[in-house]
Amino acid sequence: MTADASPAFEPHQLDEEEFLREVHSFSFWFEAVEGYLEGRPYGADPELADEPLDGDDRDRLITTLCNYCVGEVTALDASSGLVRLAPNHHSRIFLATQVADEARHVEVFLRRLDDLGVLDGEAEVRARANPRLEEFRRRVLEMVDRGDWEAAVFAQNVLLESMEDTVFRFHASIADPVTRQVLEGVIADERRHLGFGENDLGRRLARDPAGRERLATIRAELDPLVLGSFDGVYRDLGLSRADQPSLGRDYLAAVERLGLTT
Amino acid sequence: MSKATDEQTAPAEEQGNRPAAAYESVPGTVQPDEPGDGQAPRRTYELEDTGFREVPKRWRKFYRVWQGPGDSLAPNEIICPVCKVVIRSHREFRPGDRAYCMPCMSRMIVVRMPDGTLGAEVIYQ
């Protein structure tokens, strides 16, 4: 059944192929991002008053944003490489929208660093990057370079995106108003990315259950790098371990749905 | 939220629903009640836009943000297990129904959870 102009028609009535074509399309992406980014150049309403931050809070926020930049640059470089590896046009078109999303994320976080008085954002990101996140970046790009679609989609769209989603949600709940708006727009984008990753891998693993063992091994190698780096982000947000939300719960649920528990 | 009506009290067309025949060719989707299946007729709902902006306009009323503790699900709502958005339908959900989460592109089947509430299982195939 195809999309219908009837007011009672609902998305759950689309046939599966039509649903996939709709949600992977540029048109869907464009109308979606227009919905939540209109009037928010660089991720936030320019009329929104910025709260002054004291020295320590400002410094911690700069470190946090620098590490968000590392994650987003990783996703930008990896997703652009994945376009060439995409197995079909749905995935290729979707990944092109993800490339645009990730580039926007890098831009809005660098802009926020500008707002906070950082003179050379790129240098600051290099100086404050968590080494474990840098190592994760190196591993993901190796997967892309050797053409390993499944491993790279798992690392980027399931592991990294799930963890970012958790951390950004928590950060948005305690952030200053401008940072919160920037994060809300990023979170809305992340929903698509993590959904793409889980569903693509889910379809593949349903056809090739033996692939689970290989991905579970990759997961065991990468988990400490990402979980450890985001643990560091929580510390930078000024939280004690006891105050931290259950980091990774949603990620672990995704891993379980995909059958990648060891 | 959504306003409920009862299918027994008015013909489907009068409530803005599609005639039952239109559903029959889509296995797994929101299905009409089988005559004589022993279940009460499904309640139907008029959906309102709740401010969810992450999908194109025509699909927005079918999704809303889960507000966390204090929020609750109506019978025509389930939570997407992947991205935690609330998925909505014009009709009460029942186990076996198919639902789509457009914000994260997931397909799922409605299931009865051990605690008696409705949940969803993601389908990948």
Image (tube, coloured by chain):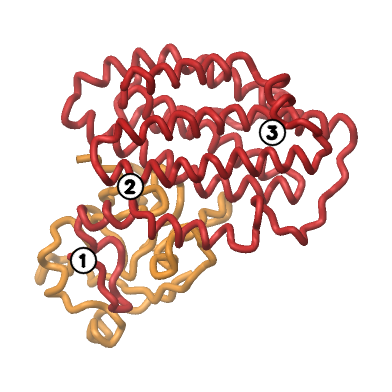
Q: What secondary structure is found at the residue carrying circle 2?
A: strand
Picture coordinates of residue A1 (x, y %)?
Answer: 17, 65
| Residue occupied by mark 1 | A2
Task: Kindly indicate whether the residue at mark 3 contacts the one at mark 2 (C-beta within 8 angstroms).
Answer: no
Q: Is residue A119 left or right of residue B25?
A: right
As drawn, A107 above or below A243: below
Q: What secondary structure is found at the residue carrying circle 3?
A: helix
Q: Are marks 3 and 1 on the same chain?
A: yes
Q: Colour of chain A?
A: red
| Residue occupied by mark 3 | A65
Q: CA distance from mark 1 to mark 2?
A: 18 Å
Disc 2 marks which amino acid?
A: Ser
Sequence order check, earlier mark of 3 and 1? 1
As drawn, B25 above or below A221: below
Q: Chain of mark 2?
A: B
| Residue occupied by mark 2 | B106
Q: CA distance from mark 2 to mark 3?
A: 30 Å
Quadrant position of residue A256: top left
Residue pictured at 63% horizontal, 39% vertical: A170
Disc 3 marks which amino acid?
A: Leu
| Mark whose residue sits in front, 1 or 2 | 1
Residue pictured at 60% horizontal, 42% vertical: A169
As drawn, A173 above or below A167: below
Q: Is residue A63 left or right of residue A79?
A: right
